[in-house]
Image (cartoon, rainbow, N blue to C red):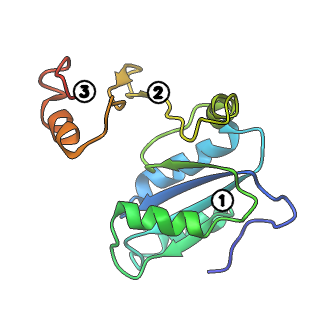
Amino acid sequence: MAERIDPTTDPRLAVVTVSYGSEDVLGPFLSSIPAASSAAVAIAIADNLPGSGGAVERLAAERRANYLPMSANLGYGSAMNAGVRALPGSVDWILLSNPDVLLSPGAIDALVAVGGRDDSIASVGPAILNSDGTLYPSARAVPSLRTGIGHAMFSNLWPGNPWT
């Protein structure tokens, strides 16, 4: 599908997400993006399950997002990379996000402000809150397969575990 971003806006910011049967959560996620930034935001949706009724493609069209049907389920990382490759060249900052979150008003602006404070900053991660407002333990000191497995297995049973 052709890019839906208005080329005259030269967006500096972008959001990339991956859908795999995510129609139920994708709409609210996309609706939360405009209030998250005061600037124009390019959106790319990589669909790892295209042809499932066209709901994701319709949502992308409604939000002027770039819809990218993958040839097969390429996996999360490969689909994210495809989404990033489809962004306009004017983009300096990219938010990679699951579609099952809601962005708070000003959230993208806050992340860009932190990242823009120091040229040595290459990546900024937000605090992620559960639906009840508690902090989701998403930050890790050193990302690794072992850390991820430990967190996944013990985060709900042992909140103070060394992997979370």
Q: Nearer the viewer, residue 50 or 158?
A: 158
Q: Mark 1 vs mark 2: which is more N-terminal?
A: 1
Residue marked by disc 3: 164
Q: Nearer the viewer, residue 62 or 160?
A: 160
Mark number displayed over residue 17: none
Instruction: Please give the name of the residue rendered at 43% of the width and 77% of the height, measured from the top-left corner.
Output: 70
Instruction: Please give the name of the residue rendered at 70% of the width and 34% of the height, measured from the top-left corner.
Output: 116
Q: What kind of element bears circle 3?
A: loop
Disc 1 marks which amino acid? Arg
Label 3 or label 2, whichever lies nearer to me, is 3
In three-dimensional space, the C-alpha distance between marks 1 and 2, rounded to whole angstroms, equals 25 Å
Disc 2 marks which amino acid? Ala
The picture places residue 5, in percent across and down from the top left corner, at 74, 66
Q: Farthest residue in the right direction? A: 8
Would you call the spot at circle 2 few (<14 residues within 10 Å), some (14-19), or many (20 or more)?
few
Q: Quadrant of the C terminus?
A: top left
Residue marked by disc 2: 127
Q: What kind of element bears circle 2?
A: loop
Dots 3, 2 in contact, CB < 8 A = no
User: Does 147 appear above or below 10?
Assistant: above
Q: Is residue 88 left or right of residue 54?
A: right
